Each structure stands twice: as C-alpha cells, then as structure tokens.
Amino acid sequence: MTSAHRTIINLDISGPTISRHVYGHFAEHLRHCIYGGFYVGEDSPIPHDQGIRLDVVEALRGLDIPNLRWPGGCFADEYHWKDGIGPKADRPSIVNTHWGDVEENNHFGTHEFMHLCELLGAEPYISGNVGSGSVEEMSQWVEYLTRAGDSPMVRLRQQNGRDEPWPVRFWGIGNETWGCGGNMRAEFYADLARQYGTYCRDHGENQLYRVASGAAVDDYAWTEALMKTIGDLGCGCRPHDYFQAVTLHHYTFANSWDEKGSATDFGVDEYYATMLNAQRMDELITRHSNVMDCYDPGRRIGLVVDEWGTWFEVEPGTNPGFLRQQNTLRDSLVASLHFDIFHRHAERVTMANIAQTVNVLQAMILTDGERMVLTPTYHVFEMNKGHHDAASLPVHFATPVSSRATTLTVQGGAKSLTTLSMSASTKGGRALISLTNLDAEAAQTVEIDLRGASFDVFRSRILHAPHLQDHNSTEQPDAVSPQPFDGVTRSGDTLAVALPAHSFATVELVV
Ligand code: AHR
C-alpha cells in the first residue's frame, strides 16, 4: 500500500552552499583503475590521447568531475613521485605491495595524471607520501608542480617538457596514517601533519588546501588529536596554517569488514543492512563535526570524506587484490543517500571522493578490454549535477522508518532505517529536488509543499529497475539507467511524487 509523506521546501530560504567538490573522485594505482581503466598506454589500439582512454574520458565529462584524488589510497604512502617522471623507458619499476603484489612500471606518473585532469576538466587532488617518504620529497613535489620562474624543481619539470606550473590546490598529507599509511598514533601523526604542512609551500599564486589524514570511521579521538594542534602557537601564526581540512573514511559493507557480502547475490535483509551501514555516514559526520566545533567553532577547517562507497567481495574469478565488484541498483541508492547526507552537512563537508572511479569498488565505469559500461552509480552522479555549488534548501519531512530494518544489528549497533531520503538546492533560477525511496518493497508518495516562489516543473527523471540486484553489462548496458518520470503530479503549489519501491528520482524546477 502506498503511504503519503508531507514535505515542505521553502524555495526562498536557502542554507549553505553545497561544494561541487563533494562530487569528487578517486583514482588509485589499484591495478585496473589506472592500467586498462584510465590508461591504456601509447601503443594501445583503444583510442587514446597520450595513452589516456578517450571513451572513459568522454563518459566522465558527462559528470563535470570537480576533482580527482591520486595516486592513493594506501598506494600513496609507498609512491615516490620521481619514479614517475621522465622518459618512460628510464622509469624504475616497483612492487605494488598493497594491491595484488604486482609490478608497477610507473608509466602513469605526474605528467600523465595532470594531463588526465586537463582532459576531464577536473582539479587535481594529490595525496602525498608521509608513510615512507620524506618532508623534502613532498615539498619538492609541490615545487615541481606549482612553482613558476626558476628553481631546481622548475628546471626538472621543464626538462620533462612542461614549462608552466600547474594550478594544484588540493594536497593530502598522507593517507590512513593510522593504518596502511604508517600505523602511527594520533599525536605522533598530528605533529607530522604540522611539519609536512609547514614545508608544503604556497608558491606564487598557488594557495594549497592541505588535507590532514583523519579518522577511520568512528575514531573521534583521532579527530580530536588533530584538531587540538590547530591552537595558537604563540608565534602569531593563524591557527589553521598547517592544514585546512581533515579527512574521514567510511566504507559501506553489506555486513562488516570481515563479511563484506556479495555485490550481486544478496537478499532483502542484506540490502537493509547495507543501507543502515551507509546511513551511518550521517552520524559520523555529525559527531566528528561536533569534535571539530570545540576547537574550530567558526568552521574554517573542512571535513573531507575522501574515501566512501560500497566495498563488497570481488567479482568471482578476478584477482582479490584488484577490488573489482559489480554495481547494482543497491549501489546507486547508497550513492544518493550519501549525497543527501553531504548536502545536509554542507557547512562542514567541503569535499568527498567516491572510491573509486573506474573498475575498483563502487565505480562509475567498468571496462572489459575495449568495451565499457556505465554503472547505476554513474547515473546518480549525473542526475545530481544540478547540486554542484548550489545553495542547499532545507527539506522538512517526518521520516518513515522500516520495521524490518529496525531488527537488524549492524556496524555501530542496532539501528532503524529511515526509508525516505531527500535533499534540495537552488542555483541560477533552477531548483533540484532529489528523492530516494529506500524501501525494498513498498512504493511511497511524497507530497511536497513548495513555498516562497512560483515555479514550473522543468524535468523529472527516475532511476529504477525491477530488482535490487539489477545492474548494467556489456550485453545490457542500460538495464539501470535514468528514464523520464511521469510519477509527478501538480496541484497548486504542491507536487505529489509517487516513488516506486527502491528508486531514485530527481525533479528539476524553474523558479
Ligand atoms: O580504496 C581502497 C583502499 O581503502 C585505499 O587504498 C585505502 O586508503 C582504504 O583503506
């Protein structure tokens, strides 16, 4: 039976701006994300530009990717950037010990990454090596990329064919330094973040946005240790000079880290457990942000969720170290739910990066030799583009709860799942409303009372499929793809939106 949920959106009372950077991406040297995914090499028969795959670039241009994080992840803390510059034949190989224990020939390095960003129109977000690198190495990388004029690193860059510096704002000071990035203790790393932050210089006009390696999931003590260090040092330094943001990583498993669950073979209870684990992002951001508020009430330090998304068992028959997984309608609802959460926390969450863009974890694109498919998750990013840099519009509604999910115990304890998720924003005479019905079995109707401005419905689209497990393949590339949505009816200033079970819809308004 369909129930109706009354909702109010004031079109003329907006909240903080949703940074386009919450729609950021992540490309790690995790085998086929780079090799075969983004990069096929200059001798490949697959159409490319300097080795970068053009079909993948073309598809991703459709998402207006704001930033791309590279080279890791765990790989970042064993990556030595000078191995990846200069003639390819002279570049040394290393072993990628984290991911598949395979040889990394360094053919995709700094210049290739910067070219990829230029092709995508995305800002680079470089993740520097703290775990096995040095302050000097990271400081020189910043100089190599961003300095103009004449200096040792500028001359090296010019020898490698690039005269002008690149603008690079986003800079990660290590990754998961509590784990693969060095197994450090919080206070030790907090001091390193200040040290590295000091020597990652702003060259000329290039102002770095230094991102300190923050907490795993609910490690609030880690955030506190980092935030404590922003206090005044008695040197007249502005308190946030060392880093401008801290990170949070939280992945969504069907069950737990030890029981990740199948990407395609799951039942309704596992679906609800997945959604509960995804919904936990809201609590995590709220609580980390509360800790940050104690030291930074003015919210100058950003929270950067630079790894999020689903992590399931790898696709049967693939290398367990390459983390390839299918992507179903369930994944797309995990994505839409995360975006609603990020939009609600727009004041604190300045960036987020889904893991990872191509062929790894919750990917936008899966390649298979010369072929590729767009995943259901890709379509959520595309349908939500109108939220980039838009002013958030608070959505007021009573949240329906699933009785089935209430009985599940997931990461963080027993929880109840809110089965409806929504967010809205406005920009340039348009408004975009995103709605997700998480209920696996029941349709839900939402009655949206739109106040404060006159409007016309410009377009409505829906992402839906008969089964939660439905996904796209090279044989059926559009099994889960956006369709025109005729479930929106208008009565005065009220829109009734009839959402089928397990669906994501967007309603675009002219205001
Ligand atoms: O995204 C895969 C891995 O997950 C990253 O390398 C690491 O930072 C995290 O643990």
Image (spheres, rainbow, N blue to C red):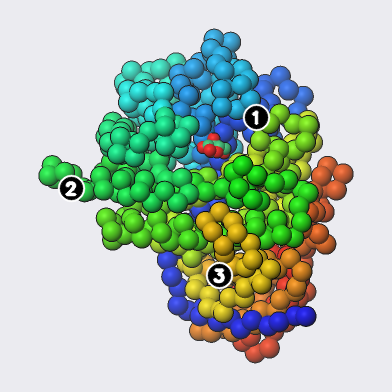
Residue corresponding to mark 3: 424
The quadrant where ligand 1 appears is top right
Check disc 2 and report the residue beneath it: 232
Quarter of image, res 386:
bottom right
Earlier along the polypeptide chain: callout 3 or callout 2? 2
Residue 325 in view, yes or no: yes
Looking at the picture, how far across and down is residue 228, in whole percent? 26, 48
What residue type is disc 3 on? Ala
The tag earlier along the polypeptide, 1 or 2, is: 2
Residue at 73% x, 46% y is 263
Residue that lies at the very extreme toward the right in this rendered image: 475
Q: Position of residue 347 (x, y in %)?
A: 40, 62
Which one is in front, 196 or 389?
196
Q: Gap between marks 3 and 2, in whole Å?
A: 38 Å
**210 left or right, relative to 426:** left
Nearer to me, 494 or 430: 494
The residue under the point 56% across, 47% down is 251
Q: Is residue 24 above or below residue 506?
A: above
Label 1 sits on residue:
321
Amino acid type of disc 2? Asp
Disc 1 marks a residue whose amino acid type is Gly
Q: Position of residue 42 (x, y in %)?
A: 67, 21
Residue 18 shows in this picture: no
Q: Earlier in the sequence, mark 3 or mark 1?
A: 1
Residue shown at 61%/17% (left/top)? 103
Tag 3 and tag 2, C-beta contact below 8 Å = no
Q: Quadrant of the C terminus?
A: bottom right
